[in-house]
Image (tube, rainbow, N blue to C red):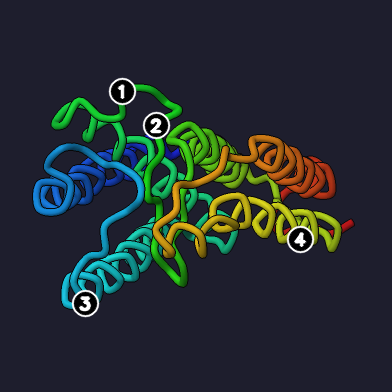
Amino acid sequence: MDRIPVQKLVSIFLFGIAFAFVESSIVVYLRALYYPEGLTFPLKMISGEHLAVELAREVATIIMLVVVGVIAGAKRWEKFGYILVAFGVWDIFYYVWLKVVLDWPRTLTDWDVLFLIPVPWLGPVFAPLVLALFFTSCGAAMVIRSAKGLQFRPTFSSHLLSVIATIVAIYSFTHESLAIMQGKPPSPYPYGLLIVSLVLYLSGFLIACRAAGRTQFGTTH
């Protein structure tokens, strides 16, 4: 119970790194097809056929990241921890590989199209990277707690804070979606909303850890 699952964590890290290369390689081809001069605004409309494939790929990506976490973990919150680690590592190394292959982004303030479901998500590279690093850290902490026999008990407050944090983060990436789809350049990214979402996420995580205390699995208060 006290052994940290190093082998599993390393395996999830390797999966995230390899899967990130698969994702980035697809973007390399899309950039060559639609943005041979580099990603610029206003965004170009891709064909309906390519859009359908891209949307399906994004759904498949989320499914794969969730499934690998579910397979790796034994308990509910341990599984979720592995999902967070897989997602975080994948997102971080997605940009690492783009930098290696395309020498992009040039800076962490370069804007990117992050997601397309249900509307385009956009923001500077810095924003998803910070969230990915946070998710990776929290996920690894959850896995390590589980290995040490410590519970993770989200309360109503921690759930509420996490939901609000998610809404704020998503809004920060999508509030300019309509303007983007109308061919307009994005307005400055609201970094304040990113900070708010991180503070809310961290508060919810710490509340869940504190609620569990150092209670061992299988025991009751």
Amino acid type, mark 4:
His
Q: Are marks 1 and 3 in contact (CB under 8 Å)?
A: no
Residue 71, picture quadrant: bottom left
SS state under label 2: loop
Q: Would you name the residue on which mark 2 appears?
A: 110
The residue nearer to you, when weighing 78 against 103, is 103
Q: Are marks 3 and 2 in contact (CB under 8 Å)?
A: no
* Mark found first going from the N terminus, 2 or 4: 2
SS state under label 1: loop
Residue at point 29%, 40% (across, down): 94
Amino acid type, mark 1:
Arg
Q: Would you name the residue on which mark 4 appears?
A: 159
* Mark found first going from the N terminus, 1 or 4: 1
Instruction: Characterize the local packing of mark 1: few (<14), some (14-19) or many (20 or more) Cα atoms within 10 angstroms.
Output: few
Q: Where is the C terminus found, in terms of image quarters?
A: bottom right
Q: Would you name the residue on which mark 3 appears?
A: 48
Name the mark nearer the viewer: 1 or 4.
1
* Mark found first going from the N terminus, 1 or 3: 3
SS state under label 4: helix
Q: Would you name the residue on which mark 1 appears?
A: 106
**In the rendered image, the vertical position of residue 18 relative to residue 156, given as above or below:** above
Across and down, in percent, residue 63 comes to: 35, 68
